[in-house]
Image (tube, rainbow, N blue to C red):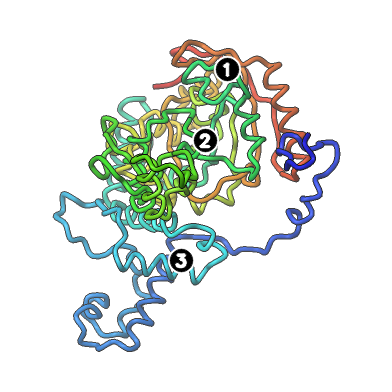
Amino acid sequence: MDKGKKPARSELDTTTEDPRLAKRKRKKKEVPPVNVAEDLRAAREHWTRNEAKDADPKDPMLRQMSGEGDQRDLLSKAVPMSLVDPPMQNPMQEGTQRMVASARDLMDIKTLQEMRPEVYGTLTPNQVWSLVAAERKGELQHGRAMHDSELRLVELNKKFGTDYEPDDLPAIFRSLRDRRLASNFFLSLPPGGNRDGVAEGPSLLDHFIADADGLFRNVWETGTSQASSNLATRGGVEERFGYAFALKRTEGVPLTFFGGGDGKFATAPVGAPVDDADTSPAGMYLRKLQAESPNYLKPGEMPKYAAAVGESQVFGVSARYGSSVVYWKPDIDWRTTRTPGDSWSSEYLQSALSFVSANYPESVFAYTDISVARLAAAEATGFKRDRELAEKIEETGGNLSAYIETQIHGDLSWKDVDKVVLNYGTYGGIKGNMVITYEDVEKDAEKLRRFAKANGYGFTVEMGRKYVHSDENAEK
């Protein structure tokens, strides 16, 4: 190793503790539990109270904010302050929400970051806006989602012969809210190996371990993904999550993602920094974009992805996304949001259009794929009402093709990993079946344990179970 070169994380001597661990092992300052909805109400009350102190009681804006009452009514505790403005649309549009922050939204974001800098100050304003928007959207569609959740029980009973009752809903909602967050990876394969059939080069795990900052990066940063790396669609989806300002669309119709779209964005990966000596039109254009767009070289601001999985789903999100399952610590839950299904789904109620916070599991249960709803209801009630599914779980390990997508806002690192479970077997891929052997995952387990010890990470590594790909193994 060159003496003048900073060693990569994978080159460190793993037999002794890294001296950089002293700082990492210092006791962290305790941070009170985070509930974005409660913090948002407190922030709104804080800045509206301060604004009202010097305001004219007859001011139209103040009267609107206070519900046509006087200043004393502004902070009424009789009913929790709504997270949304009074609806300005017709009843058929209930549950809709613009995804560009208004002036009042910006005040909420600013106040959240000032009131709890140790929490919201760790995120960018765009990331905080995504959390705020998800809370508002969940509240907007709460009533309809509760009604549709009861209809979902009727649908389950009719299709599967179960006997769920409305009284089961609270337990189902709690179970969904408390689910573990997980991401699947083919750690033994090169990046994109499951999608493109790439068989040569460093494995995905080698790339993860070599990251100098210990971060898990998104497709905007890496250009590759376990799923699709189509940035036109990804950008349209993430505009729906509130990241339009960060993405800075340069071509295409805003908020479009169905059918792939034709979008281009200022955050798309480019060679950087652009050489000042490059006087070509392309070089001059890139320098202009970099100068005008503060986030142009910060694609890491966009979310990372996981899913909320049940206890019986031993193969994690879905085996089609990876043999290995990374389970994330509950600490990150407060900065996550949900869609009932794949955010790219053509089923619009499962897609980014139904984006909500984790505090609104009724929206997830009402609109997720019926296979996911069935498993959620059965787990929440101990499988007492669905014995048939309990028997199938024993055979399939709870593997589903559908899932509850989770968006993680802010940095995601190895410090956020709770455990890694390494499964093995035969997996279906776009280019044909892939075989992950027990020997493959044994090697990965050794790499991970040495890596964790060398860098002071507290995650555990477990050997999983064998998976055999078949059409019946993934419940539709």
**Tag 3 residue:** 39
Q: Residue furthest right?
A: 16
User: Is residue 166 visible from the viewing direction of this image?
Assistant: no
Closer to the eye: label 1 or 2: 1
For the residue marked with disc 1, what is the amino acid?
Answer: Tyr
**Tag 2 residue:** 310
Dot 2 alpha-carbon crowd within 10 angstroms: few under 14, some 14 to 19, many 20 or more:
many
For the residue marked with disc 3, what is the amino acid?
Answer: Asp
Mark closest to the chain's N terminus, 3 or 2? 3
Q: Residue at x 69, y 26 (%)?
A: 444
Q: Position of residue 111 (x, y in %)?
A: 43, 70
- Quadrant the C terminus occupies: top left
Q: Position of residue 72 (x, y in %)?
A: 32, 85
Mark closest to the chain's N terminus, 3 or 1? 3
Mark closest to the chain's N terminus, 1 or 2? 2
Regarding mark 2 in the picture, which secondary structure is present there?
Answer: loop
Residue in the foreground of this view, choosing between 388 and 38:
38
Up the image or down, 443 lies above or below 281; here it is above
Whether pointer 1 and pointer 2 mark residues with C-beta atoms closer than 8 Å, the reply is no
Disc number at residue 467?
A: 1
